Image (spheres, helix red, strand yellow):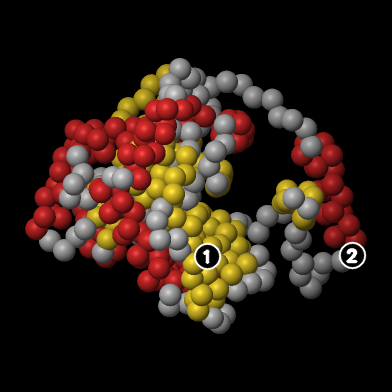
Amino acid sequence: LGGFSFFDNYKNDQDWKNFGTSHFYVPKLMVTVTNEGTFITSNYEINEQTSVEDLLLQYKEYDDFLEKFGMKQPSFTQSECINKDEFEPNEWIQSVKEAIHQMKNEKLEKVVLNRTLNATFSSEVNSTKVIYELEATRNVNYVISYQLKDTVFISATPERLISKKNNTVSSMCLAGSAAKGITKEENTEAADWLLNSKKNNGEHAFVVNYIRETLQQYCNELSIPSTPRIMATKSLLHLFTPVEGKLYNHVSLFELIQALHPTPALGGFPKEEACKLIRELEPVDRGWYGAPIGWIDLNGNGDFAVGIRSALIKEDKAKLYAGCGVVQDSKPEEEFFETGVKFLPMLNALGGLRNER
């Protein structure tokens, strides 16, 4: 279980110093819940000195832990947001304007810009409670929590990067979004607008074409619908296109991750030029925001999502991340509003803005 940073180096990694550019766990205890049942897996480190008695003692320790702690519903104290600060909002809008200006003068068609929000809470944030809150209102594909020492990265992301089961791979194209309405009629109107938006469909097409061209190098069969559909999350509607493929020979999951990351949905297009501009315009390191995070098993099968709609939590403070795709037709103030909407589900789960949807 683990993940990577968005870039392979940091400008200033103080917030992310525990995470580095990659980190993976082999879990001591793992609970897997599937349609076939619930399974508990325990892993043990064995060396030349390990005896059967050592393993039995370790097994008993794990079993006692599950009996005492693992099967009880946890209790929580409620943290409330006492202060929130959107980091340099005016400068961020200027960055969007600069990106649009550069697109008109250079061979750059899309760039994804991230912005951050810093929040302080009335007490130390309980990351387990945040997971429970996100699961209670879950309408995304993944809720991920990854803790290293006193820092936790949490993501409630709708977006898969790549999964692999034997020679079958799955990915998705998720780009282009609109805020949800309050009523069913407003949502229908927003979905119709999104499906017919030239700007959003163009942004979505970059992702579709990129994933198609990348996976064609590894697959002899590739299924991608010709038109996108709508995926709804708590606050947003997205243009969504599923991708399925059959690998023509053995390719590792990590090789596929390296080939795909970052897609135009998280970086931009062309990739190299977009990433260079991101480094120039974003003052805050992305860390694991927007980067691959997931699992891989001993057979090389696994599933990796991208860590968007996320927060980095330490004690009573959290840094929230949200991004948007900028193209030539983008309007900076609208992109600012969109990223603000993307902050809300995580901010609510952390303990802030209970009265906002």
Q: Of discs 1 and 2, which sits in the foreground?
A: 1
Residue 153 spot, x, y in % from top left: 50, 43
Looking at this view, is 80 or 243 the one in front?
A: 243
Among numbered discs 1 and 2, the one appearing first in the sequence = 2
State whether residue 86 appears in this view.
yes
**Residue tagged 1:** 244
Name the residue rendered at 57%, 20% in the picture: 78
Q: Position of residue 133 (x, y in %)?
A: 58, 30
Q: Which mark is residue 122?
A: none
Give the secondary structure at mark 2: helix
SS class, disc 1 = strand
Identify the residue shown where x is 35% and y is 45%.
195
Q: Is residue 31 left or right of residue 85?
A: right
Residue drawn at 40 percent across, 48 percent down: 239
* Residue 47 place in picture, x, y as percent: 76, 70
Labelled disc at residue 52: 2
Point out residue 82 in the picture as x, y percentages from the top left corner. 42, 19
Mark 1 Cα within 10 Å, few/some/many (few <14, many 20+)?
some
Numbered circles on residues, count: 2
Report the side of 214 relative to 274 (left or right).
Answer: right
Residue projecting furthest to the left: 105
The quadrant of the image that shows the N terminus is: bottom right
1 and 2 marks in contact (CB < 8 Å): no
The answer to whether one can see residue 23 in this image is no
Q: Nearer the viewer, residue 153 or 215?
A: 215
Q: Label 1 is placed on what type of residue?
A: Glu
Neighbor class of circle 2 (other Cα within 10 Å; few <14, some 14-19, many 20+) is few
**Depicted 335 relative to depicted 2: above or below:** above
The residue most toward the bottom is 249
Residue drawn at the location 15% of the way across and 43% of the way down: 97
